[in-house]
Image (tube, rainbow, N blue to C red):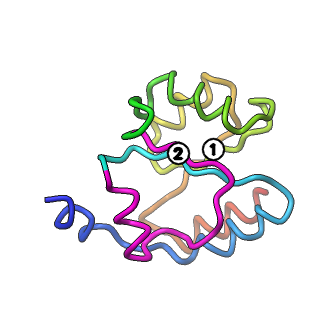
């Protein structure tokens, strides 16, 4: 079942250079809403950016999912930086609102137009 679910995912290589650019001057992290073993399967299939993430918060490991406040608290703690210095890039308006309430900077990524959204993100940073 996990394999069938992950088969529905598509890679977004248009954001990979943006992540690499951000990593030149900042930490980069991944905050997932994943099922057990899902992140490992996504990484194995090369769907996720091959970047060396500084922090990974896997919801299936920590026991909370976005938009739960607790997952943002865990991410903040692991990032070890001021929460106002965090830029949260997300394609769900609900999750963006939750991060804003928590005090993070946010960027709503448009997954339907990944090339344009990646360029907007690059311009934003």
Q: Is residue 34 left or right of residue 72?
A: left
Question: Mark 2 or mark 1, which is nearer the start of the sequence?
Answer: 2
Mark toward the viewer: 1 or 2? 2
Residue farthest left in this picture: 1
Relative image position of residue 117 (x, y in whole percent): 58, 64
Relative image position of residue 13 (x, y in whole percent): 53, 77
Q: Which residues are magenta?
A: 37-59
List the residue tagged with mark 1: 88
Q: Residue at x 16, y 66 (%)?
A: 4
Q: Residue at x 48, y 68 (%)?
A: 48
Q: Against 81, is 40 above or below? A: below
List the residue tagged with mark 2: 31
Q: Secondary structure at mark 1?
A: strand
Q: Is residue 59 left or right of residue 38?
A: right
Q: Residue at x 69, y 69 (%)?
A: 18
Of residues 118 and 48, the one drawn nearer to the viewer in this rendering: 48
Magenta stretch: includes residue 78: no
Relative image position of residue 116 (x, y in whole percent): 58, 70
């Amino acid at each position: 079942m996990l394999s069938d679910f992950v088969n529905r995912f598509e890679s977004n290589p248009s954001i990979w250079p943006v992540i690499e650019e951000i990593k030149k001057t900042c930490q980069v992290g991944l905050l997932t809403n994943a099922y057990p073993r899902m992140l490992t399967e996504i990484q194995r299939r090369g769907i996720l950016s091959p970047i060396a993430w500084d922090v990974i918060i896997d919801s299936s490991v920590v026991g909370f999912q976005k938009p739960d406040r607790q997952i943002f608290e865990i991410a903040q703690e692991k990032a070890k930086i001021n929460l106002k210095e965090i830029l949260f890039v997300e394609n769900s308006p609900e999750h963006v609102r939750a991060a804003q309430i928590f005090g993070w900077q946010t960027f709503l990524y448009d997954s339907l137009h990944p090339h344009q959204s990646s360029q907007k993100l690059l311009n934003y940073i």
